[in-house]
Amino acid sequence: MKQPSLLLVDDDAAFRQVMAGELGRCGYEVDAVATGEEAIERVTTAEPEVVLLDLRLPGMGGLETLKAIQACTPTTEVIMLTGHGSIDSAIESIRIGACDYVVKPCPLDELQIRIQRAMERRSLRQRTSILERGLTPPDLSNSFVGDSPEFRRLLNLIERVAPSDSTVLISGETGAGKERVAKLIHARSARRSRPFVVVECAALQESLLQSELFGHERGAFTGADRAKPGLFEVANGGTIFLDEIGEVSPATQTKLLRVLDTSTFRRVGSTREIRVDVRILTATNRDIPAMVRQGLFREDLFYRLSTITVEVPPLRHRGADVELLAQHFAAVLNDRFGSNKQISEAALQLLRRHSWPGNVRELLHVVEAALVLCEGPQVLPEHLPASLRNGRPAAQTGPLAQDTLPTLQEAELSHIRMALAASKGHRGNAAKILGISERNLYRKLREHGLV
C-alpha cells in the first residue's frame, strides 16, 4: 500500500530534520525543503498529498508560497506551521485556501490528527470532482443525427436558446429525444462544466418527489434517520431537468413556483431557507395548456416554465432522417458488439414506411434487436418485428391520417413485444430496453394480458 506523501517546508534545519524523521516513523513518505522556491519545485514534480508549510520563510514568504502551490497543484492540501505571534497571518492563510494551521511546537499526535483530516478532505474533494464530472454530460451534438428541415430548425433553436439562462419547456412525444435536447442545451450553455441533474417526476411518489427535490432534515418523517440534501442543492450552479413535469402534484407545483420566483426553498421538516443558482429545464408529453384549463396545473407555474418552448418533432415528420438514424445506430451497435452488419435496402424500405409511434427510441430498439437476431452480414426484413413487416406505409411529412395511426395501447403492446423478442423473454433486459423498471414492465404485462 502506497504511503501518504508529505512535503515539510521549514527553514529551521534542526526542526526540519527531527520532524521529518518522526513523521517518517509514523508511516508517511516525507520530503523536506528549507525555502518556498524549493517547495514550488518539489510540488510541481512530486505532487505531494499534504504540505506542512511554515509561515515565516526567507525569500518567498509562506502566504506567497501557499498561493503558488494552489496554482500548481490545486488537489494538494496545505497545513500552515506558525508561531504564537503569527496567528492573524495563519487565519489569513485559511481564507486564502489552506485547510488548517498548527502552532509550533506542536505535539506529534495532534499533528497526525491534522494531517489525517487534510487527507480526508483531499479524498472528499476528489470524490466530489468525480461525481460532478459524472453529472456533467458531454456535448452530444455528434449523436444528433438528421438532415430534415424540421430537425435543422430544432438544432437552430437549441443554439439560440442554450446560451441564455431562461427556463425552457421541452415538449414532444414519448421517445422523441426530449432528454437529449435538454442535455445539449446544458452542454452549450455557460453552465456546461457544472452538474446536470435529471429528475424523473413520474417515477416517484409525491412524498418521495418532494424529498428528492428539496431534501429533508433528520426526523422529518419515519425513516429519515439523517439529513439529506435535495437535488436542487446537488444541481447548484448547473441545470436541473424535470422530466414529465405534467405528473407533478399541485403541492409540489407550489414549491417549484417558489424556487423559480425566489431561488430559495426549504428542506422537508426545516424552517431554514436555502438559496440556489439553478437553471430549470422541463419536459412533458402531455398537453399542459389543456391541464391548465382543467385546473390540473398552475397557470402561473406554466408561464414561468414555458418562458421558451422547444418542440421536438416526432420521427414520422422527419422524412429521410429515419434512414440516417438507422445507419447511425447500426454503426454504434456494431462498434459495441464487435460486428460489421449492414442494413439491407429491403429492410430500409420497411423502416421508411413505418409510422414510428415510439419515435427515435423505438427505432433504436428495432435496430438493436435486428442486429442481435441477424446471423449473417445483412439485416433482412425477416429480422424486423412483424409490426413493421405487416404495417401500413407512413406519411413522410405532415400529420398522419387518423385511420393509419395505431392506438396508444396498440403501440405500447407492440413495443413491449419487440423488447421481449429482442431480449429473448428476459424481463430485466426488456425493461432496460424500454427504459422502465422491471416492476413497471410486469404491471404493463398484466394490463395487456401477457402474464
Image (tube, helix red, strand yellow):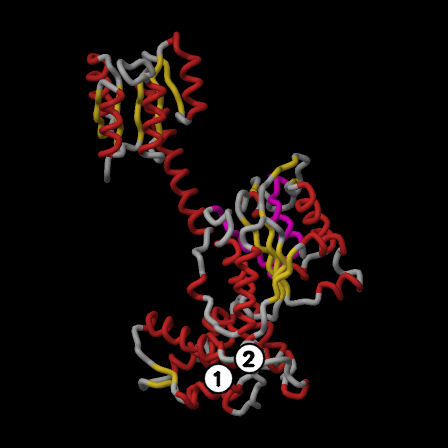
Position of the N terminus, as image quadrant, is top left
Residue 209 seen by the camera = yes
Q: Where residue 356 is drawn, which disc sits there?
A: 2
Out of 309 and 109, give the one closest to the viewer: 309
Q: Which residue is most to the top?
A: 85
Disc 2 marks which amino acid? Trp
User: Where residue 134 sits in the image (x, y, percent)?
Assistant: 43, 51
The span shown in magenta is 194-220
Out of 330 and 21, give the one closest to the viewer: 330
User: Where residue 260 sits in the image (x, y, percent)?
Assistant: 67, 46
User: Where residue 79 sits in the image (x, y, percent)?
Assistant: 35, 23
Q: Where residue 351 is drawn, which disc sits there?
A: 1
Residue 15 in the image: above or below residue 295: above
Question: Which residue is rendered at x = 36% and y = 14% of the image?
Answer: 103
Asked whether 171 falls inside the magenta stretch, the response is no
Position of 51 with respect to 410 (left or right) is left
Q: Where residue 34 is drawn, which disc sits there?
A: none
Q: CA distance from mark 1 to mark 2?
A: 9 Å
Of labels 1 and 2, earlier in sequence is: 1
Position of 184 with respect to 413 (left or right) is left
Out of 317 and 35, give the one closest to the viewer: 317
Question: Which residue is rendered at x = 65% and y = 36% of the image?
Answer: 273
Asked whether 205 falls inside the magenta stretch, the response is yes
Question: Which residue is rendered at x = 41% and y = 27% of the image?
Answer: 97
Disc 1 marks which amino acid? Leu
Please tell me whether mark 2 sits on a helix, a strand or a loop.
loop
